Image (spheres, rainbow, N blue to C red):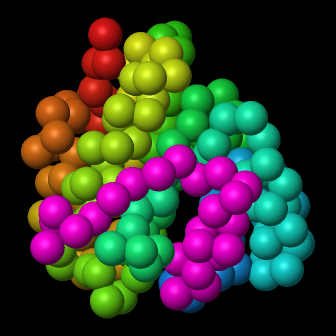
Amino acid sequence: MPDRFSFVLATADRLTDIELVFDGCAGGRNCRCAYWYLPNADYKAGWGAGNRSWFRDLVTQPRPPGILGYHDDEPAGWCGVAPRAVFDRLRRSKPFAPVDDRPVWSINCFIVRKPFRRQGLSRLLLKHAVEFARGNGAECLEAYPVDQRRAAGTGDLYPGTLSIFLDAGFAEVARRLPTRPIVRLDCR
């Protein structure tokens, strides 16, 4: 089935399809990736309609905020990717504080609609996010996945699982939380 997936940039003309993917996820429906971009008070105040409106503005910006995956012509998944510097949460985070002064891009969110789970879509979204970042000049990519080997349960897997990043060539560079390593891929 992976050969039936296709991938495009998450642009304003795809907003209806992006929203279909987000609306298929309980957290995504209300978050819209605002968790990463906005100060916590603004993110919480916007939960639901406010974050939806904020995201509609974000997707109109010149640089798309992510990758949208399709199965045939049906929206199937999302991967958020952008320069680390645009993410307020990462600028303020102690566990995900920069490991050095390199300019990096961050991959921070995956959403896969239920009918398309367990088919390798997250791995394919990751591959296309890497290509997008490289094509936009990223020297290094970073992510903050869940290490399921150390996690008590599956919990929130929206940042992706450690295994998909390691399989894609990322390497762990820091671990300040037991289940949330920082992984990187050199794009040069």
Counting from the top left corner in percent of width and height, residue 96 is at: 49, 40
Query: Which percent across, then down, holds residue 159?
Result: 41, 59
Q: Residue at x 40, y 63 (%)?
A: 69
**Left or right of 65: which side holds 106?**
left
Q: Quadrant of residue 92?
A: top right
Residue at the limit of the structure toward the front, as seen here: 73
| Closer to us: 87 or 132 | 132
Residue 179 seen in the figure: no
- Decide: is 30 above or below 127: below
Q: Is residue 115 left or right of residue 41?
A: left
Q: Could you tell me which residue is drawn at 35 percent across and 33 percent down? A: 131
The image quarter in which residue 152 lies:
bottom left
Residue 117 forms part of the magenta stretch: no
Horizontally, residue 157 falls left or right of residue 67, namely left
Answer above or below: position of 50 versus 138: below
Q: Is residue 12 magenta?
A: yes
Number of numbered discs on residues: 0
Query: Residue placed at 62% from the left, 46% from the top?
Result: 65
Report if residue 154 is visible in the image: yes
Quadrant in which residue 142 is drawn: top left
- Please report the bounds of the magenta region as a residue range: 1-24
Spot occupied by residue 121 in the image (x, y as percentages of width and height) = 26, 65
**87 horizontally vs 61: left or right:** left
Quadrant for the C terminus in the image: top left
Split into 4 quadrants, where in the image is the N terminus? bottom left
Question: Residue 3 in the image: x percent, y percent?
Answer: 16, 63
Residue beneath the point at 36% across and 78% down: 155
Q: Is residue 72 above or below residue 90?
A: below
Chief secondary structure of the magenta portion = helix
Q: Nearer the viewer, residue 22 or 142?
A: 22
